[in-house]
Amino acid sequence: MPTVDRNRLDDAASPYLQQHADNPVNWQPWDDEALAAAREQDVPVFLSVGYSACHWCHVMEEESFEDDEVAEVLNESFVPIKVDREERPDIDSLYITVCQLVRGQAGWPLSVFLTPEGKPFYVGTYFPKEPKRGQPGFLQLLRDVRENWSDPAERQEIEERAEQWAAAARGELEDVPDQPAESPDADFLDAAASDALRSADREHGGFGRGQKFPQPARLHVLLRAHQRTGRENYRAVVTETLDAMASRGLYDHLGGGFHRYCTDRSWTVPHFEKMLYDNAEIPRAFLAGYQVTGDERYAEVVRETFDFLDAEMRHPEGGFYATLDARSPPLDHREGGAGEVEEGAFYAWTPDEIRTALDAYGDHDDLDADLCCDRFGVTEPGNFEAGLSVLTLATSVPALADEHGLDEAAARERLDAATGTLQAARSERPRPRRDEKVLAGWNGLAVAALAEGALVLEDERWADLATDALAFVRERLWDPEGVPAAGADADADDTVGRLQRRWKDGDAGIDGYLEDYAFLGRGALACYEATGDAEHLAFALDLARCIEDSFWDAEQGTLYFTPAGGESLVARPQELGDSSTPSSAGVATRLLAALDHFVDHDRFGEVAASVVGTHATTLEENPLKHPTLTLAADDVAVGPLELTVAGDLPEAWRTTLATTYLPERLLARRPAADDALDDWLDTLGVDAAPPIWAGREARDGEPTVYACRSRTCSPPTHDLAEALEWAADLAPGSE
């Protein structure tokens, strides 16, 4: 039988692929050489898609991919290909869509058998080596596929199935309606929020009755709808969800930051990996919740999460790493001893470990240990496995004080000191592995969250982290000279910039996807709003031009996830729905709608309106699956609240912006005088001031604000609160 000669992952930049470089399986990267080998040898491809922090990916590696018997079958009868889903979300999107269509569910590791042309004919997720709990054994599955591939009748059936599944994937990912529907109006937001309300778990917070995933975009839909309608149930669902995420196992109560999701309805036991995107998008929801409620706990969660990003996820020169693993080596004294890695080993505790840590790392007594165990729900039976407990805020400080005969201040003081000691003790444990690749899009999400945090929390530290990360990505992954423009309006000598997706140890690679341009563009715009630096706005506009040129299909009226002229897969995906990250089409549409006010043409606004119109029926049929695109539709329907500030932003105005929930806010900062605007226009590469700046200069030598909605502006004023009060009368739902 033909063979693939060797494992080719040694030179891969991806830490996930490098983890598999020593497997006896002759793994290939997804490239022309591997696919050509499958065609030349006429053997199927076995595609395994995962990521560095994925728990079940590690399990399948240990059970099967490190096994010589499995490796022999894979190497002799297949071309085995490994893909890091974080590097190649296009491949992941294509085949996970097939898995969802065929199996009704999907996840990672994603295991797909393909024809040499890349068409899927068998798909699943984790397979144990031998059959167990109703799952087929991977080794037998390989043998069955090999046998069927060699049988002419079975081979024909395989190829017919592959054609059908490929067509289904194209239909799911590529197709758009023949005729655009009428775009949703301002009332659609209320309908979407009503759907979210019906799906809410009012007992435990979040949505649904099973495993709990963060759904930050749904929370933004509910808060925006609450502001517009005054319906308290919308607000209540948000606070119930934020409270659950902040107080239970999703949140790391010692180190800050959020885990990926919880395996139970009550948010108690997480999958412990920490992803950069979660620790960007979840804090944005908490910032909005803080503005609406004034609950200081929400602000503290954001600060602690940003501190976690700074301490644990930041490259020394500014960019943010991708993930922390769920697993780490167990403590020597625990059952099983040192050696094998375990999920959650770094984060979980027993009562004895609490007492030992407080004794060894600080000056504490038994009362402190009792307070910590009661506060964090650490018990002898545990809430996790093998007597281990995931920390939760199980008991309030007033209740603890009453139970232990302390006044509340004394209880809080003792708890704070003991918690600091536990943090020090935990820092000495074997740490989870970190995936140190820097992804452009995920950094864009973090940049946007930090920049918004600088405004809402009135702390310039977060703006500094945001701009440093933006500069890191821009320097290493952005080529402003780029490539010849391909858009319909492009001249022969026009160019657009080009963004690479991944940087690791000095190596940049992989052409950016829509999410990279859109997420980074949103981050750059947020940095401009937070700092007033026109360079950030200019970068956001550059990225928007790339989106229009490379991802916009005017004939279909949609934005595709992969660039025009990129690698040809079985299908060219769109990303309309939110998954673990926001919909890239939704973020791009919102970005274009906002930046339309900073250009002297209508194309950005027309693209945004067209995308919403094209997918209006999809939105109306299932807004819960498409919350970011729903927010984009609302942006298009109601327009932004333009706050043009000429001159420096006074401290009092900063406080007003920090404490006022303004979901449609577009903060347009400009120099005080028109003659000083010329340098900004040079930075943007335009001859005349865009509409949002034109004629809106400072008056009487003082910072001046103009509040505008739908081309109607307040009189220039030196009082931001007065301008906001004027604008409130024009807000949707104010009639």
Image: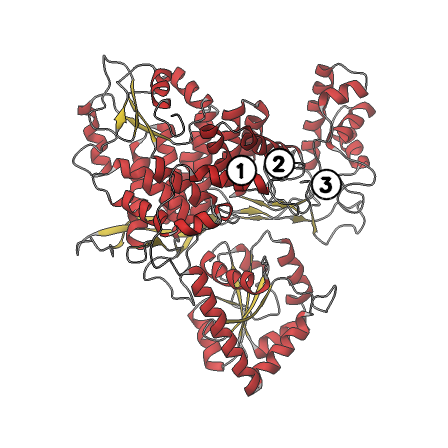
Query: Disc 1 vs disc 2: Cβ atoms closer than 8 Å?
Result: yes
Q: Amino acid at mark 3?
A: Ala
411 to 163, vertically: above or below: above
Tell me what residue is drawn at x 70 percent, y 49 percent: 329
Q: Amino acid at mark 2?
A: Met
Q: CA distance from mark 1 to mark 2?
A: 9 Å
Q: Amino acid at mark 1?
A: Ile
Q: CA distance from mark 3 to mark 2?
A: 17 Å
Q: Which residue is mark 3?
A: 348
Q: Which residue is mark 1?
A: 282
Query: Disc 3 vs disc 2: Cβ atoms closer than 8 Å?
Result: no
Residue 206 percent location from the top left of the image: 61, 39
Q: Which mark is residue 245?
A: 2
> Which image quarter is the C terminus in?
top left
Q: How many numbered markers are drawn?
A: 3
Residue furthest front as drawn: 735
**Mark closest to the chain's N terminus, 1 or 2:** 2
Q: What SS does tag 1 mark?
A: helix
Query: Is any part of residue 313 visible from this angle?
Result: no
The front one of 638 and 695 is: 638
The front one of 4 and 567 is: 567
Instruction: Tell me the colour scheme of the image.
Output: secondary structure
Query: Disc 3 vs disc 1: Cβ atoms closer than 8 Å?
Result: no
673 to 38, vertically: above or below: above
**On the picture, is 170 further left or further right than 367?**
left
The front one of 25 and 524 is: 524
Residue 534 percent location from the top left of the image: 29, 32
